[in-house]
Amino acid sequence: MPFRRGIAVAIAAGFFAVTLSSCDLFESERSVFASYRAPQGESEVVVEVEEPGAAFAPHTIYVSLSRKGDAESSVPVSVLETQLANDGASLNPSNIRARWETPQRLWLCLRGEEQADQLLSIDISAARAVVQTRECGDGWEL
């Protein structure tokens, strides 16, 4: 009997290890959601999304900026990292919208199911973002 119990424990441990290695509990995928080229084409804002590691967890949003010109300024610069809670659903274009105000200012609206809207003002010349928690609105007048 102890021999069978040992085999059963070994089989259960092996099954548990295989199950854990085949699921994505420990790895999150980060992928480009959208990129927004400035009207004059001299800069680009890239939005990447990291899928949540657990059901109903928020997505992590990364915003970076690259500017054309000398080699140093063409390297993407991280501008912002934030969370977007979307009730466990995948993100779609209605969750992240963009509008260029000028060639130097991009507005991003982050809209999740479980949080207030975040309106991001991205200043291209300073490579920084200002976050406002306010409703973007359907026509999202800025």
Image: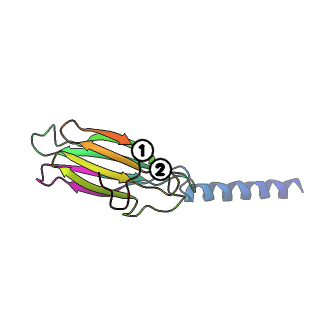
Residue 32 as seen in the image, left or right of residue 41: right
Crowdedness near tag 2: few (<14), some (14–19) or many (≥20) residues, C-alpha within 10 Å: some
Depth check: give the residue in front, 139 or 125: 139
Q: Position of residue 78 (x, y in %)?
A: 30, 40
For the N terminus, the quadrant is: bottom right
Residue 139 magenta: no
Magenta span: predominant SS is strand
Crowdedness near tag 1: few (<14), some (14–19) or many (≥20) residues, C-alpha within 10 Å: few
Residue at position x 18%, y 38% in the image: 125
Q: Which residue is mark 2?
A: 116
Taking the view exactly as shown, the residue that stands out farthest to the right is 1
Report if the CB atoms under discs 2 and 1 are less than 8 Å apart.
yes
Residue 69 as seen in the image, left or right of residue 127: left
SS state under label 1: loop
Depth check: give the residue in front, 107 or 2: 107
Q: Quadrant of residue 4?
A: bottom right
Q: Which residues are magenta?
A: 32-46
Q: Which residue is mark 1?
A: 133
Q: CA distance from mark 2 to mark 1?
A: 7 Å
Q: Position of residue 87 (x, y in %)?
A: 54, 58
Q: Position of residue 16 (x, y in %)?
A: 67, 56
